């Protein structure tokens, strides 16, 4: 199985400030044949299901605000929230879909400072 | 807009089997993969498995011996059966569309094994 790790476990950011979450996979999730990274990011608000934000490591799902961006390749990835809004207080998960079983990171909790 | 809704018992006894159904509305089960994901209380997300509309399945190795996922195309539903339950199977069970990134999710249903 591909093991996903995330850092930090939690972070506190002021409203309007930048937040960055790191995700690392135990092996590369880059497919050299199509140059795609098989990595997604989700936001999970309390009491709600996860919501897909980013797929292919950097492609925003339609309707997702452009303050969310994804970057990275191979084994190291970052989700950046450029200007934290109230609705962004949540847990964030990365997920690889390079191999089955699909695996998720342990989550990063984002809160207000 | 595609919507998913899980249904099934909220309380199951240890050693018994869990059966959940996911009903898809606003779209069809045809030509898509459908997944089950669970989340233990206060914990992270665990993928259980997926099914294609033709019945092709792929299960997590850690659960494969106890899991069956099936699809009911006429009723636009797919189902999860998990046998030999223990308290470690307590959690929220989600159905979702996809076998890579999971685009649409149901609201989840809490299953307590006790």
Image: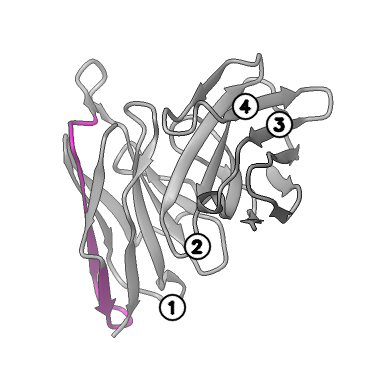
Front residue (pair B79, A22): B79
Tag 1, which chain? A
Q: Give SS at disc 4.
A: strand
Judge the density around disc 2: few (<14), some (14-19), many (≥20) Cα neighbours within 10 Å. few
Check the image and name the residue furthest to the right: B74
Residue B7 lies, in percent from the top left, at: 75, 47
Q: Is residue A92 visible?
A: yes
Up/down of B75 relative to B13, above or below = above
Query: Foreground mark, 4 or 1?
Result: 4
Magenta residues, start to end: A10-29
- Specify the quadrant of the image occupied by residue A67: bottom left
Query: Foreground mark, 1 or 2?
Result: 2
Question: Can you say which quadrant of the picture contains the C terminus of chain A?
Answer: bottom left
Q: Residue at x 32, y 55 (%)?
A: A106
Q: Give SS at disc 2.
A: loop
Check the image and name the residue furthest to the bottom: A113
Judge the density around disc 1: few (<14), some (14-19), many (≥20) Cα neighbours within 10 Å. few
Q: Residue at x 23, y 55 (%)?
A: A6
**Which residue, given by chain and number where applicable, does mark 3 sit on?**
B78
**Which residue, given by chain and number where applicable, does mark 1 sit on?**
A86
Query: Foreground mark, 2 or 3?
Result: 2
Tag 4, which chain? B
């Amino acid at each position: 199985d591909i093991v996903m790790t995330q850092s930090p476990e939690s972070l506190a950011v002021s409203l309007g400030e930048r937040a960055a979450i790191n995700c690392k996979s135990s092996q590369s999730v880059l497919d050299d044949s199509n140059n795609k990274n098989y990595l997604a990011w989700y936001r999970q608000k309390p009491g709600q299901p996860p919501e897909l934000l980013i797929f292919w490591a950097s492609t925003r799902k339609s309707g997702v605000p452009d303050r969310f961006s994804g970057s990275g390749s191979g084994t190291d990835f970052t989700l950046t929230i450029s200007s934290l809004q109230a609705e962004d207080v949540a847990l964030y998960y990365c997920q690889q879909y390079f191999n089955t079983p699909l695996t998720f990171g342990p989550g990063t909790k984002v809160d207000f400072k | 807009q595609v919507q998913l809704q899980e249904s099934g018992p909220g309380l199951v006894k240890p050693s018994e089997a869990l059966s959940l159904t996911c009903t898809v509305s606003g779209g069809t089960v045809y030509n898509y993969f459908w997944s089950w994901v669970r989340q233990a209380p206060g914990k992270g997300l665990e993928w259980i498995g997926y099914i294609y509309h033709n019945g092709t399945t792929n299960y997590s190795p850690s659960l494969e011996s106890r899991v069956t996922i099936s699809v009911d195309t006429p009723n636009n539903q797919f189902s999860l059966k998990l046998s030999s339950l223990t308290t470690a199977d307590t959690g929220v069970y989600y159905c979702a569309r996809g076998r890579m990134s999971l685009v649409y999710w149901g609201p989840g249903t809490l299953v307590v094994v006790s």
